[in-house]
Image (cartoon, helix red, strand yellow):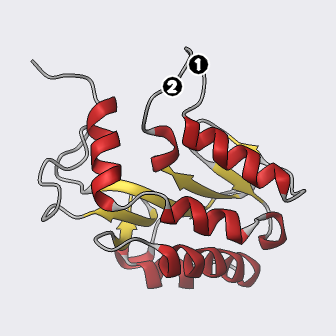
Amino acid sequence: MQPAEGTVEGYLSSLPDDRHAAISAVRDVVNANLPEGYEEGAQFGMIGWFVPHRLYPAGYHTDPKQPLPYAALASQKRHMSLYLMGLYCGTVEEPGGETADARWFRDAWVATGKRLDMGKSCVRFRRLGDVPLEVVAEAIRRFPVATYIELYEQTRPQRG
């Protein structure tokens, strides 16, 4: 779903009631735990949290006009998705493996007894009860802006 009028409020108002409630609850947890410096807005057709250009002028490497994405939340055809880009930045110990933060997240989620449907860049869920909100809260808190930028810079291909 594309945000109506390109706003978070427009995006939320376009959702059916059950999706609106679930997306709003996860959004509330992200906003309550978001480190200082990130901003919320409509980005890439979903609700997004990002590092604004005033803090990271280089922007997102694939589209420098876009601020650097940090997290996103979307309602899709068969599920809802939470994108946590910080989990994918950093050192991967073996090819095709996970970062230490992605491994922490996977272990913390599974320890709650809830089923985890996690892809390379997102966590998929069908209803709010599938989401351990305390794990999401900790994942959001783990990356102050300076830490996230540092990890992002380390993982970007070197320009030459």
Residue at image location 65% in from the left, 45% down from the top: 104
Q: Kindly report the distance in space between the C-alpha atoms of the residues bearing marks 2 and 1.
A: 8 Å
Residue 2: x and y in percent read: 47, 65
Q: Residue at x 42, y 57 (%)?
A: 143
- Return the mark for residue 92: 2
Mark 2 surroundings: few (<14), some (14-19) or many (≥20) residues within 10 A: some
> What is the quadrant of the C terminus in the image?
top left
Instruction: Report the front residue among 88 and 43.
Output: 88
Q: Amino acid at mark 2?
A: Val
- Which residue in the rendered view is the most extreme toward the top? 95
Is 104 left, or right, of 59 in this rendering?
right
The circle on residue 96 is: 1
On screen, 122 above or below 76? Answer: above
Q: Report which quarter residue 69 is drawn in.
A: bottom left
Q: Which mark is residue 21?
A: none
Identify whether 84 is placed above or below 50. above
Q: Are marks 2 and 1 in contact (CB under 8 Å)?
A: yes
